[in-house]
Amino acid sequence: MTVDLPLLLFGLLLLWFPRQWMRLGVSVGGRRRRPSGGPVGGVQPWEQRDAGDPRINARREFGKLRNYFDLLRAAAGGLAIVGGFDIQSSLQPASANAVVHPLLVMALQYGILLVGTLIQVIRYERRHISFYAPIFFLAGLSVSLCGGWAALFAFVLIWGVNPMFTGPQAFLTLYALAQLGLGVLFHGVARELPVVAFGLGFLPVLISLLARRPLVIMTRKASSPSGAA
């Protein structure tokens, strides 16, 4: 097995970077002051929902800068580890005729993606474990796992039907199925990669069900969880 060490470290850094670390320093100097006369959290009255509404607010999610960072870093990290778009993977079999080495390479690649996804899903804050739905991170991974067009269409499709869902669990379940179906349909990548995309996309749902704890969407206000499934 051959390893492009700089590219591998670059991919690991992007994929294994916990999203909550981006909040470091935000609380320095105290909480942000609320603009005088403005609504709490910058949410307009017509944008507010009833307490306990588990649906994902698309306008709010697309207004978060961190979500775009998640999307880009997962896409770049996935390409560094798995390859795609004429980018060679940082992990390559030593010989094209070998049998064990290609399987080992795939296991390492998918293992890196698995660990990265778990880091984004599981959070331990204030002595409390919560399970986060990393929608934009998974969308970034789908670029290398499903191909460009399949990833784009799956992302557009899932947000188009988002108002029908009751929470993150239903959202991620159908999103994982959309990635699998469109990834296989477009044949832009190896056949097993859309299956991996499905597994990673459904993983947060599976963890949530096994732990009997809801998936949450982290709100901007005091980083409090919302959107429980």
Image (cartoon, rainbow, N blue to C red):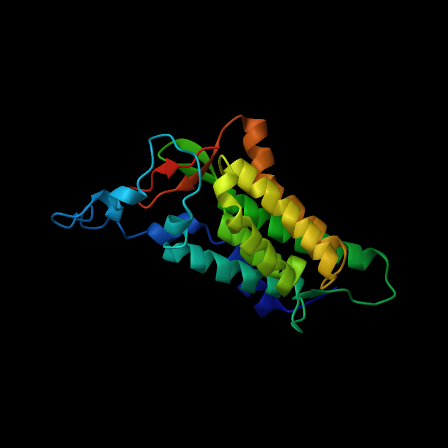
Q: Is residue 221 visible?
A: no
Image position of 60 (left or right of 31)? right
Residue name at image x 66 percent, y 62 percent: 147
Q: Residue 62's quadrant in the figure? A: bottom left
In the rendered image, the vertical position of residue 63 relative to residue 39, given as above or below: below
Image position of 124 (left or right of 7)? left
Q: Residue 217's quadrant in the figure? A: top left
Compare residues 225 and 107 and report the one nearer the observer.
Answer: 225
Image position of 90 (left or right of 214)? right
Residue name at image x 25 percent, y 48 percent: 42
Q: Is residue 131 visible?
A: yes
Q: Quadrant of the N terminus?
A: bottom right
Compare residues 139 and 120 and report the one nearer the observer.
Answer: 139
Q: Position of residue 16 (x, y in %)?
A: 52, 53
Q: Position of residue 80 (x, y in %)?
A: 60, 65
In the rendered image, the vertical position of residue 44 relative to residue 146, given as above or below: above
Residue furthest out toward the bottom: 86
Residue furthest out toward the left: 36
Q: Position of residue 97 (x, y in %)?
A: 88, 65
Residue name at image x 78 percent, y 67 percent: 94
Compare residues 97 and 155 and report the one nearer the observer.
Answer: 155
Q: Residue 155's quadrant in the figure? A: bottom right
Residue furthest out toward the top: 212
Residue name at image x 32 percent, y 51 percent: 24
Image position of 112 (left or right of 190)? left
